Image: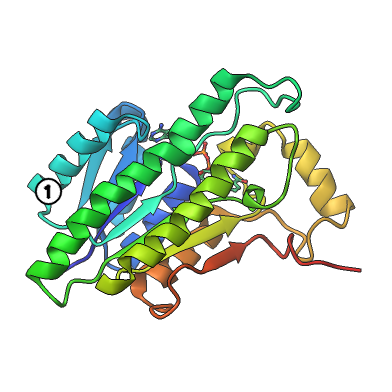
Amino acid sequence: MKKVALVTGAGRGIGYGIACALAKDGCDIVVCDIHEESVVTDALKGLEALGAEVLYCRADVASAAARAEMLEAIRARFGRLNVLVNNAGVAPKVRADILEASEESFDRLIGINLKGPYFLTQAVANWMVEQKQADAAFGGCIINISSMSATVASPSRGDYCISKAGISMATQLYAARMGEYDIPAYEIRPGIIKTDMTAAVTEKYDTLIFEGDILPQSRWGLPEDIGKAAAMLARGDLAYSTGQVVMVDGGFTVQRL
Ligand code: NAD
C-alpha cells in the first residue's frame, strides 16, 4: 500500500519541493495550505503528474478547528497517514529590532510556526500509535522544517528565531516520546533557500552568497535540496537516528577560521 504524506504549506516553495520529492518516491500527498484551491491548482496538478493521488486541505495550521477538520478529511479519503511534514511557516511582516518588536508579531509567529505544528504533531502522533497498534508493519515518521535561525541569532527577527528554536525542541520531545513505537521524529534545518519567503531580500543574499564568503557552497539552496532530505527520511534511510537534525544549509553553520 502506498504511503500517505501530509505536507503543510505545500502550495509553493519548500513545501512543494518536499511534496514533489515524496510523490516521486511513490507517496500519495495531502497538501495543506491557507489559500483557496484555485491558487494552488498548478501545484496539485504537478503532484498528480508525478503519480500521486492528491488531497487538498485548505487549513490554517494555527487553528485547532482547521487542524481537526483536516485530519478528518484525511481519514475519510485515505484512512491512513504515514508521514507528517510540518513545513508551513511565516516570517515576521516587518523585521523589527527586539528592543522594539511587537507582541502581536510574536503571537502570530508562535501560533503558526510553533503552537500549530506542535499540536498537529500531537494529534497525528496519536493517530500513528493507533495505526501501529492495529498493524505492527505500519511505518510512520514526523519531520519538522525549522531553520538555521533555531541557533543563529538575528536580533531583527527574534520572534522567528524563537519559534524555530521551539520547533527544534518539539522534535526532540516527539523523538523521545515516539521511540517506543519506532516512529522517528527528525528536524531539517534549511539555510538560505530561494522561495517567495526570501524574495524580498534577494539582493542582500545575492551579495552575501556571490560576493561575500557566507557559504562554503556558494549558491542559493533550492526547495529540491530540502525535498531530497525529506524523501531520505521518509523512506527510512536514517531509521535508527530519531531526533537528528539534518542541516541543508550549504555549510553556513560550519565554523571556519
Ligand atoms: P513560502 O512563504 O514560500 O511558503 C510557505 C507556504 O506556507 C505558503 O504556501 C503559505 O501559504 C503556507 N502557509 C503560511 N502560513 C500558513 C498557515 N498558517 N497554514 C497553512 N499554510 C500556511 O516559504 P518557504 O521559504 O517555502 O518556507 C517554508 C518553511 O521553511 C517555513 O517554515 C520557513 O520558516 C522555513 N525556512 C525557509 C527558509 C528560506 O530561506 N526560504 C530558510 C529556513 C527555513
Q: Is residue 193 left or right of residue 38?
A: right
Check the picture and name the quadrant holding the N terminus: bottom left
- The answer to which image quadrant residue 61 occupies is top left
Whether 254 is drawn above or below 107: the answer is: below
Q: Position of residue 257 (x, y in %)?
A: 92, 69
User: Badge 1 is on which residue?
Assistant: 75
Seen at 58% across and 48% down, the residue is: 165
Residue 60 placed where, x, y %? 34, 30
Answer with the quarter of the image where residue 9 lies.
top left
Left or right of 92 in this view: 38: left
Residue shown at 24%/62% (left/top)?
A: 82
On screen, 62 above or below 256?
above
Q: What residue type is labelled 1?
A: Arg
Residue at left offset 18%, top offset 34%: 69
Query: Residue 35: where, in percent of width, then height?
Result: 35, 28
Residue 15 placement, left or right of 5: right
Is residue 58 left or right of 215 when viewed as pictured? left
- The answer, for residue 45, to whether it is visible in the render is no
Look at the image and tell me whether residue 166 can be seen: yes
- Few, some or many residues within 10 Å of mark 1 (<14, 14–19, 20+): few
